Amino acid sequence: MGTAERGGAPRAGGAQVTGHRDPEAADHGIQAAEAEARAREADVLAPEVGRGIREQQYRPLWVEEPARRRRLPDPVRTAAVRAVLLIAVTLIQAMVAFLCTMAGSWLAFPMVISSVVSTIVATWGALDVWVTRQVWNQRNGVVSMPSSTARALRRERRRARRQARSAERAQERIRRRGGAGQLSHS
C-alpha cells in the first residue's frame, strides 16, 4: 500500500481512497480489484470530463473477495445448526436451573434434571456434527488417502458406466445390422 492510499489522497474526479489492507489478503486479489475500480472510474469519468460536469465519484462500499474456506456440505451444516440449537437450549436451561436454585423455587429440581439430560443430548449433537463430517468426507472423496472408500466407489461407478456404454454400443450395432448374426429371433 502506497503513501497516497494510506493518506487518503484524492484521485481523478475527487474520489478519495482511504482503505487499509487486510494483512492476510492476497496481493494479487487486491491489485486486481484496484485495477478494476480504476477502470470503472475512468469509464465513468471520461464522459463527465468532456461535458464539464464535476460530480464527486465514490468508490464502492466493498469489494467482493473469494471466500477463504468453502461452504460446509448440506448434511454437515444441518447437523451443525441442530447442535448449536441444542447447546443454546442447554445453556438456557442451566441458567434457569441456577436461578431457580438461588431463588429456592420448587422448579429448581426438575430444571436441574432436565439440564443434565439436555447436556447429554447436546453432547450427542456435537458428536453428530463430527461423525456427519467424517462420513461426508469419506463418501465424497475429500480425504485424499489411498485407502479412501470414495476413490473405490468412484472407480466402481466408472467401471459400471463403461460396461453400460459398451453394452449399449453392442446393442446399437446389432440394431444397425438388422439383427444379422443372431441365432434366433425372439
Image (tube, rainbow, N blue to C red):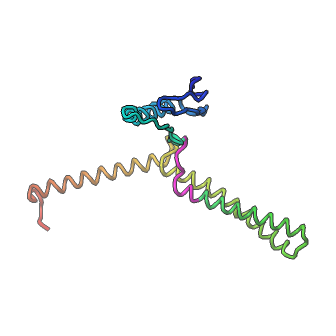
Residue drawn at the location 62% of the way across and 53% of the way down: 130
Residue 72 magenta-drawn?
Answer: yes
Residue drawn at the location 18% of the way across and 57% of the way down: 171
Residue 7: horizontal and vertical position, in percent?
61, 27
- The answer to whether 86 appears left or right of 60 in the picture is right
Residue drawn at the location 80% of the way across and 67% of the way down: 96
**Can residue 144 be seen in the rendering of this structure?**
no
Q: Identify the image quadrant of residue 16.
A: top right
- 84, 147: nearer the viewer: 84
Q: Is residue 14 above or below residue 173?
A: above
- 165, 115: nearer the viewer: 115
Q: Residue furthest top?
A: 3
Residue 53 magenta-drawn?
Answer: no
Residue 18: horizontal and vertical position, in percent?
58, 33
Q: Is residue 150 above or below residue 49?
A: below
- The answer to whether 97 appears left or right of 154 in the picture is right
Q: Is residue 168 above or below residue 56?
A: below
Residue 91: horizontal and vertical position, in percent?
75, 61
**Can residue 94 be seen in the rendering of this structure?**
yes
- 59, 150: nearer the viewer: 59
Task: Indicate the quadrant containing the N terminus: top left, top right, bottom left or bottom right.
Answer: top right
Residue 163: horizontal and vertical position, in percent?
29, 52
Q: Magenta region: which residues? A: 68-78
